[in-house]
Structure formats: C-alpha cells, structure tokens
Image: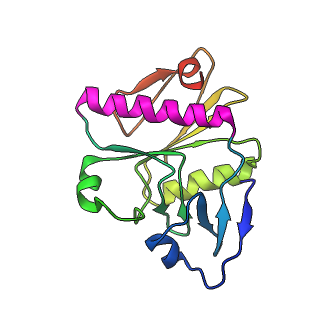
Amino acid sequence: MGTATLLIENFTLENFLTNPPDNMEWVDNQLVEKNGMTLKHGEIQGNLYFYWRRYIISSGQAGKVYIDTPCRTNKQGRRPDVAYLTPELVAQFGDVPTLPQSFPLVAEIVSPTDLAEELFLKAQEYLDSGCLEVWLVFPESRWVLVITQERGLMFKTGDVVSTQLVLQGFSIPVDELLG
C-alpha cells in the first residue's frame, strides 16, 4: 500500500497487539508505516466518521466509529481508515489496545501510493477475518466499492452509496461523501 518498512528488532505481532505503534500496521511479519495520506484522504476519512457516527446516534443502532484504530486479522495487524464496531462487540472488547478481530464494517480510502491488487487483497483479508462489509473509497475516480463475501457493488458520482449488511439503512450521496 505504498508503505515503508520500519525495522525494529524482535518486534512481533503480539507486541503490535498489546502496544500498537502510531501510524503503523503489522504486515508480513514486520512493521509497516501507513503513508500517502493526502488532504482529500483526510477530508473523506472525517466525512465517513461524521456520517456513520451521526447515523448510529439518529437511528438508535448504537456502537462506535473509529479512525485508524488497530485490529487483528487472521494474518496481520491492521489500522482501517474508518471502522464501525457494533454495541455487542463494544461491550465484549471495550477498552483493549487492539481489537482482536476485524471490525464488522471497514472503510479504506485509497491513497495515490496504493497498489490496486494489494488494496483488494487487504479487503479480502478483512472479509476472511470476520468483517462483513468493506468500503473502498477512490477519491480521484470518485468511486466507492462496497464489498461483502457475496458481492461487490460500485457507486459513482451521482449515485447514492448504502451499506449492505452493517448499519442497516445508512446511505449517502457519493458526491456528498467525497466532498
């Protein structure tokens, strides 16, 4: 994902899970810095956080929305750009330093340095680790892909993107989300 490796001797996945370094993921047995964030990336990340949080409050669905919060997949330690945790999982895991599983709903905002194949593999990794729905947001092409185990849907300028399995009933115009 257009990342740089930071070498810290003897740093393990267990170290990451108990004390995750800021702006880092644990990928392929090493710490990797998340980089390539642009002003647009930050704006969209903030928009998603705001709209998902506002929706869980107004709909009464509860739960929590997070930004760059570490979680464990079956293979890695990740930090999704934006993620939603159901009230049941909030009650179960509450205040752990790293969520020991994938979030049910994850959004990754594509940076200019991201490679397409790596991004889709990351989405599949989330899904293979218990995530129900992944949003891949493409700021430059103005697309949002919503991926579940069963299907992938593409939304573009002029469309209204909606959740498929998590946060039932949430929708937003692509143009409003992307600013």
| Residue 153 visible (yes or no) | no
Q: Position of residue 68 (x, y in %)?
A: 51, 51
**Quadrant of the rendering where the N terminus is positioned:** bottom right
Residue at the image point whose x is 67% and y is 41% from the top = 110
Relative to residue 89, is residue 139 depicted above or below?
A: above
Determine whether, in the image, residue 32 is placed left or right of residue 74: right
Q: Is residue 26 visible?
A: yes
Image point (28%, 58%), residue name: 94
Q: How is the image coloured?
A: rainbow
Q: Is residue 51 magenta?
A: yes
Q: Residue furthest top?
A: 158
Is 25 in front, or is 119? 25
Residue extending farthest to the bottom is: 10
**Residue occupying the point 25% across, 36% down:** 61
| Segment tinted magenta in the rendering | 38-60
| Residue 59, horizontal then vertical, whole percent | 26, 28
Quadrant of image for the C terminus: top right
Q: Is residue 168 left or right of residue 157?
A: left
Q: Is residue 134 above or below residue 44?
A: below
Q: Nearer the viewer, residue 145 or 90?
A: 90
Numbered label tally: 0
Q: Which percent across, then down, holds residue 35?
A: 69, 52
The secondary structure making up most of the magenta span is helix
Q: Vertically, is 177 above or below 131?
A: above
Residue 91, horizontal then vertical, whole percent? 23, 56
The residue located at (58%, 51%) in the rendering is 123
